[in-house]
Amino acid sequence: MDTIHIIILAFFAFFFLRPLIFGSASPIPETSGHVYKVTKAEELDALLSSTSSVVVDFYADWCPPCRAIAPVFSKLADKHASEGRLAFAKVNVDDVKNVAGRYSVSAMPTFVFFRDGVPGGVAVDGIQGRQSVSRTGDGLVDRILGADRVALEAAVQALAGKGEAAAGSKESSGGGKAE
């Protein structure tokens, strides 16, 4: 084969095999209207100050596990999001590097749980011993590293249950909305 054929073959191989080898870098589509796409630090700060519990998905478009868990995160948001109580947000670590750095995110995906505006732990039953789960000193789940569907679902369920229990106790004690 002469040199020109090798160059042409290499050119086509690069453009056709690159997506298969390196994955797609196209944006991960968001299918839920209940997930905030954070594009700057101020947006996340506003959400954290207006919502008692927030689950943040730190992701990258080039990350295959991020693509795999994205529909699960969207379904959890559709099922459990509650204005002022529980919100879901996504932060692209390549686009909003300062936010990823602020919370020491170095692996994707990483799910961080916020309580009252700061990273905080969640009491979650049934996920002991999972390598993807990071815990606080007192045993609460504060982040999940990787696309661990079971751990993510359990942590969100625990957060949603606590929010519903707190809302129910306020209403039963007369602290609910006035009608």
Image: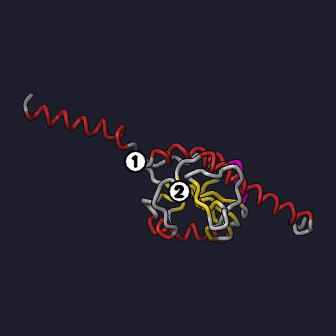
Residue 104 appears at what percent x and percent y?
49, 66
Left or right? Give the position of 6 relative to 140: left
- How far apart in space, not on screen, are marks 2 and 1 (Cα)? 18 Å
> Is-magenta flag for residue 31?
no
The amino acid sitting under disc 1 is Ala
Instruction: Please name the residue shown 90% across and 64% down the image.
Output: 179
> Is-magenta flag for residue 79?
yes
In this view of the protein, which residue sits in the foreground, 30 or 106? 106
Q: Which residue is mark 1?
A: 25
The amino acid sitting under disc 2 is Thr
Left or right? Give the position of 93 relative to 35: left
Q: Which residue is mark 2?
A: 110
Q: Residues within 10 Å of mark 1 (few under 14, many from 20)?
A: few
Examine the rendered structure and indicate whether residue 171 appears above or below residue 34.
below
In this view of the protein, which residue sits in the foreground, 140 or 33? 140
Instruction: Please name the residue shown 62% across and 65% down the image.
Output: 136
Q: Residue furthest left?
A: 2
For the record, the magenta segment spans 78-83
Between circles 2 and 1, the one closer to the viewer is 2
Who comes first in sequence, dot 2 or dot 1?
1
Q: Residue furthest top?
A: 1
Q: Where is residue 3, by image quadrant?
A: top left
Q: Where is residue 82, by image quadrant?
A: bottom right
Q: Residues within 10 Å of mark 2 (few under 14, many from 20)?
A: many
Q: How is the image coloured?
A: secondary structure
Dot 2: element: strand
Examine the rendered structure and indicate whether residue 91 appears above or below residue 29.
below
Residue 125 appears at what percent x and percent y?
71, 53
Residue 80 appears at what percent x and percent y?
71, 52
Left or right? Give the position of 115 relative to 39: right
